[in-house]
Image: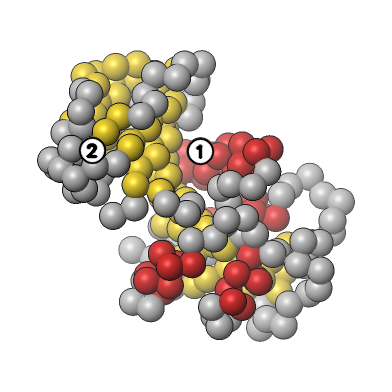
Amino acid sequence: MSVCAVVAASDFNADHFKSLDDQGFFDEVYAVDGGWAHLVSLGRKADMALGDFDSLGYVPDCARVSKHPVMKDQSDLELALERVKTRRYSEVFVYGALGGRLDHTLANLQLFARFAEEGMDVVAIDLGSALRVLVGPDAFDLPNLPSGTVSVFSASDEAHGVIERGLRYAFNDETLTNRTSRGLSNELTGKPAMVGLEKGSIFVFYPLG
């Protein structure tokens, strides 16, 4: 499996990124606008810098730079994910895309759903948790932790056949819509746990192991 890391400008979990990067987990690392500064703080050069660089304030000194105009119809992160798709990476870890401005976070969630539905495995990392998009039929084994909060929401109009196993509250072949809070705040209990669905798309928020 080939994996790309995309680092944007919002809240950056430097410890998580560094732990994977030090293992050589990422085949490439892309800096999106102000995400370049996050990588500089770690002494890590990006393989590509992409964006309009209005947040960063300068065009970075990177071997590969893709500069875009400020006035455009797509966000810098959307352009970066399109580049990841073109490069045919099977999985992308996105840092710095959750938190900060709520409108940016909502836009990014929509992007994660879109690219997952187009065949990309998308994982977003914030300061204390992760977000994974599942497109049915699929299932995901959650971290085996003694405690922690897991929330599952429909990323499509409807998600069918949603199941949750090994959590405090069970889901048994349920239908979720994107107009309900059902799925909020389930709990890990130290048992092996999983989330799955048959049709549609879901956001799975879970603690980092």
The answer, for residue 47, to whether it is visible in the render is no
The crowd level at tag 2 (other Cα within 10 Å; few <14, some 14-19, many 20+) is many
Name the residue at 68% across, 38% down.
103
- In the image, taking residue 16 as reference, residue 112 lies left or right, namely right
Name the residue at 51% across, 38% down.
113
Q: The residue under label 1 is which amino acid type?
A: Ala
Q: Please name which of the two marks, 2 or 1, marks the residue nearer to the observer.
A: 2
Q: Picture quarter containing residue 203?
A: top left
Residue 113 numbered mark, or none: 1
Vertical order, 61 against 196 (above or below): below
Q: From this viewpoint, which residue is outermost toward the front?
A: 147
Residue 25 screen position, x and y as percent = 36, 71
Vertical order, 157 against 83 (above or below): above
Name the residue at 35% across, 16% down.
175
Q: The residue under label 2 is which amino acid type?
A: Leu
Q: Earlier in the sequence, mark 2 or mark 1?
A: 1
Classify mark 2: helix, strand or loop. loop
